[in-house]
Amino acid sequence: MPIYAAPVRDTLFVLNDVLGYERHANLPGFADASGDVLEAILGEGAKLAETVMLPTNRAGDMQGCKRAEDGSVTTPKGFKEAYDQYRDGGWMGLAVPAEYGGQGLPYCLHSAVGEYLVSGNMALMMYPGLTQGAIAAILVHGTQEQKQRFLPKMVEGAWTGTMNLTEPHCGTDLGLLRTRAVPQADGSYRISGQKIFISAGEHDMADNIIHLVLARIEGAPQGVKGISLFIVPKFIPDADGNPGTRNGVSCGSIEEKMGIHGNATCVMNYDEATGWLIGAENAGLKAMFVMMNEARLGVGLQGLSISEIAYQNAVAYAKERLQGRALSGPKAKDKPADPIIVHPDVRRALMTMRAFNEAGRALVLWTAIRSDVAHRSGDEADRQAADDAIGLLTPIVKGVLTDKGFEHAVMAQQIYGGHGYIEEHGMSQFVRDARIAMIYEGANGIQALDLVGRKLAANGGRAVQAFFKEVGAFCEAGRADEKLAPYTKGLKKGLNDLQAATMWLMQNAVAKPDNAGAASTDYMQLFGLVALGYMWGQMVKSAQEKLASGEAGDAAFYEAKLVTGRYFMERIMPETAAHLARISTGADTMMALPAEAF
Amino acid sequence: MPIYAAPVRDTLFVLNDVLGYERHANLPGFADASGDVLEAILGEGAKLAETVMLPTNRAGDMQGCKRAEDGSVTTPKGFKEAYDQYRDGGWMGLAVPAEYGGQGLPYCLHSAVGEYLVSGNMALMMYPGLTQGAIAAILVHGTQEQKQRFLPKMVEGAWTGTMNLTEPHCGTDLGLLRTRAVPQADGSYRISGQKIFISAGEHDMADNIIHLVLARIEGAPQGVKGISLFIVPKFIPDADGNPGTRNGVSCGSIEEKMGIHGNATCVMNYDEATGWLIGAENAGLKAMFVMMNEARLGVGLQGLSISEIAYQNAVAYAKERLQGRALSGPKAKDKPADPIIVHPDVRRALMTMRAFNEAGRALVLWTAIRSDVAHRSGDEADRQAADDAIGLLTPIVKGVLTDKGFEHAVMAQQIYGGHGYIEEHGMSQFVRDARIAMIYEGANGIQALDLVGRKLAANGGRAVQAFFKEVGAFCEAGRADEKLAPYTKGLKKGLNDLQAATMWLMQNAVAKPDNAGAASTDYMQLFGLVALGYMWGQMVKSAQEKLASGEAGDAAFYEAKLVTGRYFMERIMPETAAHLARISTGADTMMALPAEAF
């Protein structure tokens, strides 16, 4: 059974010391959760993750979800009870406005606690995760009547939500979708078609399931310009707001998957189901993007969560497993062998994971605070700058954190040797679970294209120029600081490579778009390294300030930050050069072979 | 159901054109299988892989092996019949001396066909794979009587073999092993203890199973110097050579694993089982190493095999799946969308896999031919040089080909999007199967340590110096060749980085062994890039010669080699610089944190 201790201390360091949480006290919600309250909320979230979510995790993988002949779905043992505790704790609505039954607390708190809960049980947390995406879409695009009808129950957690995009023949290319919507006299629509890969599509943990479904209204244009978004509840709420008549939507089967067995991934059949348009006709993709952007950040978080719990277990095993002697001479002389943490190659893996996890956590919270500013600030310039940053960083958080999350689950599994390959210790599950995060909510190749194809050029490159300016200024200030300079030097080198790559794209991708596609994945990874490196720069700066102030009761904690930051700069940052070299070769060789040569 | 077509054309190119197979006609066995015969054998092997092995692959994963209460094990449906065909075709003894019932053909042929068969069904091919390792150990270390008693049946495939090293508390560190051997008056031993992770430990495909078991003779020294190797048959052969009395060895359970479900990975219980010493007392590790070295090359081959079949399926899917339009404008205008092979980021993945597979195949065959020279040449200097090369390249073939094999299985799965994550298409199985190859037969971290700790320094660095000289001379010759120079330039840069890293190790690892451990994995990967790059250099040279000679009926094949070789040099070779940068930072930061800080 895997172990897990939520990294509350580290979250507090990032929020309070690095990101200046207190500075945002003027934003709605922040003042309600600062100091001891902030700590208490994180503590409660940690407890829920460690004592409620984690104990259900292995069972979820081993049992999976079962569909009965009538289309009903049973979740693994303990899931319903764990979800009940989540719901009763009010976690679903933590960051939702009080108007709809939420607590109105900062979104960054939601992210911080989300990391813990997903570490505890990723498959289970997908049920509320999808619900929160649906809540976000209804909040932004729903009518007042729709909000009143659906949000309170969803925010309470009594009803859950889903997003229905994919069909057997279309995933990335939603323009091909065929699900039909036929307008009815009463203003509703009849929805018919088949959706696949629907996470949390059917289950036994909530009284009702609110499906958000992309479909094409009869006579709508071809392609993405003819897609609309619909609310299709499993049970049509009656006048009192209770789940009423069963709607024409059902789970046709559950997919057999590599991982996240605890989540019911359903084929959903819509057979003249009643639905209501949400947002404007034929503007469904725009409405769905509210949900997708939120979901993408949530998926990036999954990468971090799995990397963290896999790391913690690898650490425990490395301290406990006795095998061989240290190259520098025996360490545990009273034992038949040394714990394998003495071996540099094991350390390499542990330090690599650790350096990523700590920076990844900072990047997630940095982005989350920007989300709070974008939604809550009274200052338009602040809102715009924050919104720019989120748009730019979303594909990076999603793509890079999930690629690395998987890579680190594999790395942690490797530390277990053969014991990692058998299912008993749960390391295989982390690898199998983490794998999906690279695929869903837009495969990582699509994230990379979103970055180079849309986000870079948006508003004349305003977002990326602001990011370069911010990081560049940090490096410049660091140059004059004897203690910080060794760290900012590596960051500056990475930033230079990123700027050179950006320049290359500007010069070569407009005339020849394939050059953008050929560069995209490397560019995203390169950007991710600089973004994570920037987090390290800031964390090191904060740690040095704490140590210098003498008020650090916790010197070992801050000293460890300096070591781990140095490791990142020495061992991980140098990868930027290889990415730049690859980007600069362009698309010619890559595209030279005719398809039939493959 | 996955598709597969054995790359016979490519194998012939590597053997005949690149590696000069005909030049070895003076070695025993080579003249028996050249020209049409060579082609016929590869063709038969391809047929067996495509029509017998492949159809059993998915069933093997889905059904797994079942242990009954009496300890007997049933393999998945179709395995026994497929194995029967393998056995009846005489494949087990392809490269074994005729004296013991083999065909005495070159080992490189065995490797070439082995690649196909493992692509077809990795889990199934482990049963004969382990047997061949056991045959090799008995051939080298067995007494004449032991050879007569066991080899003919094993070479025939009527009996299979296993290797028993790991115990619950010891894997890498075999010095800790506890299985006991008590000498008997008749010269035999009574073996007692528990072994875990025993591949092919018990099954229903052969009449007898010959276990090679590491154990400690009563009173033997502690540590690795007190370990001996024993032959412990499941049934003790009677005077006529038939399986006779059941021995005291049994399968206690089958492990639940992430993949290779078709292979029975057993806990084996030895309860006063009768065994016979093989090789000298307390020299068991040396005897087992014959088997392990063979097995390590075989595991490297598994990495290649899975990378190849995963690539082939990704190609098929990329040509068939319609999604989106090419950035350079629609290609399949008559269809609702273009096949995804038009997208550069999909090409990137396909070209990366292809560039690896073709070079990996060349490297495996290059090493295999050296094995033939080492075992069969009449010239001592040739034998020694070949043996040096095998020793040096074994950890690289094992470590790099399996790391990349897994990475590419993941890459191929990614091309399928969500369809890759569900089990239906078999892409998940490739990922799950490939994962074990990084772990067993010495986890890849151990391979890296073997390389930097043993192989580099062996015989005063003779092997590595010879390798550098050979690759350096190739680059130097290429510099003068206008057509080849663009390729050797990248290779030379990689070689320079590798030599710089080697120099760094010489200067920094002796005084501080942790520097070697801290560098080991990066050094192995760096070496692998140069070795694969060298294969590309040679393949490009051969392809250019073919094209220049005008005799190339198959110009497209050779032109594709030039493109793929260029891709390798442009996109993959630049990684050497990051490895060198990491290696040069040493162990200080990596080892700076006390264990309790983790």
Image: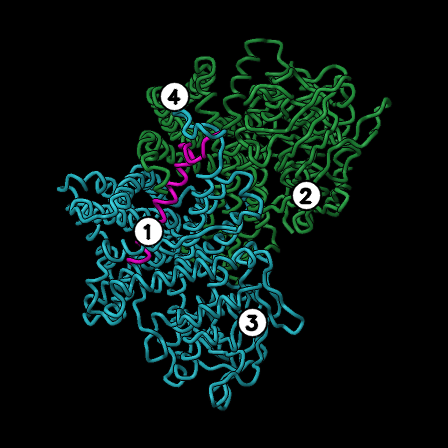
Chain colours: A green, B cyan
Whether residue B510 is visible to the viewer of this picture, yes or no, is no
Q: Residue A583 placed where, x, y %?
A: 35, 30
Identify whether A440 is placed above or below A221: below
For marks 1 and 3, give the one nearer the viewer.
3
- Whether pointer 4 and pointer 3 mark residues with C-beta atoms closer than 8 Å, the reply is no
**Disc 4 vs disc 3: which is toward the camera?**
3
Mark number displayed over residue A253: 2
Residue A480 numbered mark, or none: 4
Q: Nearer the viewer, mark 2 or mark 4?
A: 2
Gap between marks 4 and 1 measured at Cα: 35 Å
As measured in the structure, the alpha-carbon distance from the residue carrying label 1 to the one carrying label 2 is: 58 Å
**Could you tell me which chain the residue with mark 1 belongs to?**
B
Residue identified by numbered label 1: B509
- Label 2: chain? A
* Mark 3 lies on residue: B204
At label 4, the amino acid type is Ala
Taking B74 as reference, is B83 left or right? left
State the residue lying farthest toward the front.
Answer: B334
| Magenta highlight range | B337-366
**How packed is label 2: few (under 14 Cα within 10 Å), some, or many (20 or more)?**
many
Q: Compare residues A7 and B321 and report the one nearer the observer.
A: B321
